[in-house]
Image: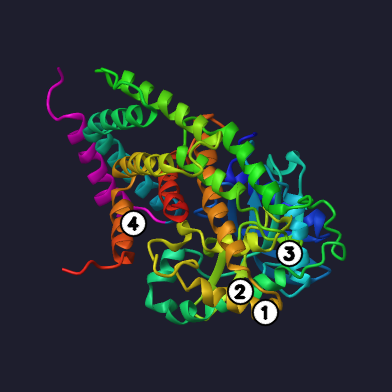
Amino acid sequence: MQDRPTSVELLEAAADFVDRELVPATEGARQFQARVVANVMRIVAREIKMEDPLVRSEVKALARLLGHDAPHLHSLDDLRAAAAGMGEELTAKIRAGEADDGGWRGEVLAVVRQSVEDKLRIANPRYLESDIAIRNAAKPQKEI
Amino acid sequence: MEKIEPGEMVRRLTGFIRTEGRFDSVAIENFRKMPGGASREIWSFECAMERGGETSRRAMVLRRDPGAHNISSNRRHEFMVIRAAFEERIPVPEVFWVSEDPAVLGSAFFIMERIDGETLARRLLRDDTYARAREVMPAQLAEILAKIHRIDPVKHKLDFLEEPGDNAALTEVRRYQENFRVLALEPHPAFELAFRWLLKRVPKMARKTLVHGDYRIGNVVFGPEGVRSILDWELAHLGDPMEDVGWMCVRAWRFGNDQKPVGGLGSREDFFHAYEKASGTAVDPEAARFWEVFGNLRWGIITIGQARTHIDGFLKSVELASIGRRTAETELELLNLIE
């Protein structure tokens, strides 16, 4: 058991320092790198907060898609390994043409989209939000 | 790669330019590293040269390999392609000297004219200064692209350019499929779906031309009046000219300005139309879409490659490392395009 601040609090404090102090004090290539550093720290902070529930639901969705029983896993390492293993299984099926058309294609696309969106929730949530906004704007409006 | 301090670089560079240009004396001033250039180092300097009592001054740029790298290309070839473009009056920097001798600066490099102006796409898309540039650039970029596709590789002795085979589209998809298999460290089902989509829609190659290979807003020097120069010719090859058209439409170059698919500046229709007018050849929208999907996939694979450059220790860089987490952006766009 570690003392406060938590890892997320420490990272956010460091990222705030980089954004507020280092970015304005640098220019050119160094300023750009400083922005990248702050962004990387915020990605890690989001990952610490959100990875566990996201990878749990990804494992469940992949198992359902591939017709496996949902595995009962607890550690994050086991969950990551299960997601990677089923991901390999899925890509092998896609390469074999099993998702080219037919009903299963729609299920594959939905699960793959969910996994990709979950990566963006950690790597770049603003990109995901703007993508969803664009897609909603492009959809024909339902009459009320 | 040998580590050379900037002071030592200046000393060696001075000797190199004096010998290559047969000058009596050369003085380099204001030698500094430029931002950007994730795959190549860029150094900027002023060069004063004297020969037989006549002096001249030029603003110059040195483009140098950072050593071992995942995406290999040849500095001499790039130098020759830029020279060909310059001779065909395409806006490019004038190129001066090239060297592949590691004894000079540790790795291959060439020296060219520095074109003053802006290269940051975000400024182009947001700043009031560039309102006029935003208006004129889509048509300018289409016209310049048509000129690039008219460069005669035989006339300019560009015989080192890779041949695309019977169908450039299929060749490129296969090439990137191989790259992807080697580079990817995790399963990427979105990319696998995109490869399947592409392989079912390979377009016929209507023309075989010189292809710039990295024709996007980030490789354009611009001013308030519009395009000043086209940079980064290291990926030039022979192929289907629609490859460059599709690459211009890749989402990553829109910087959030998604309602304008061509570099965040304009519509596909206007860009295709301007290209058709300038080149005298029709743009098949389905072929352009194929190349847009391919372009997004290619960018996604490049992001994996850039992350690998860091992960494998070729070049340790927080910028390259962080690009590995941008792969998902491309995956999302590919799903939007192929669903």
Q: Residues within 10 Å of mark 4 (few under 14, many from 20)?
A: some
Q: Amino acid at mark 3?
A: Ala
Report the Cα–Cα distance between label 2 and label 1.
Answer: 7 Å
Q: Amino acid at mark 4?
A: Asp
Residue corresponding to mark 3 = B206
Mark yes or no: residue B302 visible.
no
Label 1 or label 3, whichever lies nearer to me, is 3
Which residue is pictured at 65% across the width and 55% down the height?
A: B62
Q: Position of residue B104 (x, y in %)?
A: 73, 43
Mark yes or no: residue A126 visible.
yes
Report the Cα–Cα distance between label 4 and label 2.
Answer: 27 Å
Nearest the camera: B103 or A47? A47
Q: Residues within 10 Å of mark 1 (few under 14, many from 20)?
A: some
Report the Cα–Cα distance between label 3 and label 4.
Answer: 34 Å
Q: Quadrant of the N terminus of chain B?
A: top right
Q: Does the stretch in magenta take in A87?
A: no
Left/right of residue A44 with respect to residue B213 in the rendered view: left
Residue corresponding to mark 4 = A131
Residue corresponding to mark 2 = B142
Left/right of residue B274 with respect to residue B150 in the rendered view: left
Q: Residue furthest left?
A: A4
Left/right of residue B104 with respect to residue B333 in the rendered view: right
**Marked residue chain, label 4:** A
Q: Residue furthest front?
A: A102
Dot 2 or dot 1, earlier in sequence: 2
Report the Cα–Cα distance between label 1 and label 3.
Answer: 17 Å
Q: Up-down: is B327 above or below A126?
A: above
Give the magenta-colored segment's residue range. Answer: A1-27
Residue corresponding to mark 1 = B278
